[in-house]
Image: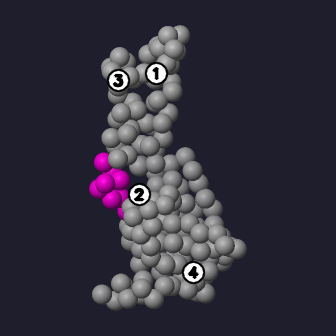
Amino acid sequence: MYFPSKKDMWMSIILWSCSILFIVPPLFFPDLGVWMTPDFLDKQWIKIVVLFPFGFCLLWMWFKTGYTIQDNFLLIQFGPFNWKIRIDLIHSVRKTRNPFTDPALSMDKIEINYGRFQTIGISPKNKFEFISELRKQNSNIKIDSNFEKAKES
């Protein structure tokens, strides 16, 4: 079952603004801004080749961030980056709003503890359905009490 990532407005603005700044100026306005490059590197095609991949990578993250539960695995896709976690290795799940980098497009995250001291934060749109699907495959997953209280209210 596939769960798309929740997307915060501020994250949307940052990702789209940076993508546009990496793609549009080198293509249409090559002399815009200060390019601290030696003369032999001051070519439009070099700026495009260097900056386009960053812009497209950010857009890839925007359009392809999601979480799939299938065949006892949690598959996490964050643009070009992928993780594969065995569901039977997941110990606990809790709500978090940490600002650290995770494969998530929102600060409203779920922190998953698995394996030996491994943690990853994700932000599925429907957290309760996501956790329900996880627990169908591993009923031993501990759910944080704050998360349970949020579900009841």
Q: Which residues are magenta?
A: 3-13
Instruction: Indicate whether 67 appears above or below 149.
Output: above
Q: Residues within 10 Å of mark 2 (few under 14, many from 20)?
A: many
Q: Residue furthest top?
A: 40
Single out the mark in the foreground, 3 or 4: 3
For the residues labelled 1 and 3, say whether their Cβ atoms are less than 8 Å apart. Answer: no
Circle 2 is placed at which residue position?
Answer: 105
Instruction: Indicate whether 95 appears above or below 15.
Output: below
Numbered label attached to residue 33: 3
Q: Is residue 53 visible?
A: yes
First in sequence: mark 3 or mark 4? 3
13 lies left or right of 148: left
First in sequence: mark 2 or mark 1? 1
Numbered label attached to residue 138: none
Circle 1 is placed at which residue position?
Answer: 36
Circle 4 is placed at which residue position?
Answer: 92
Residue nearest the observer in this picture, 34 or 25: 34
Position in image of residue 143 (x %, y %): 51, 85
Q: Residue furthest right?
A: 116
43 lies left or right of 7: right
Residue nearest the observer in this picture, 65 or 43: 43
Q: Could you tell me the amino acid type at mark 3?
A: Gly
Q: Could you tell me the amino acid type at mark 4?
A: Ser
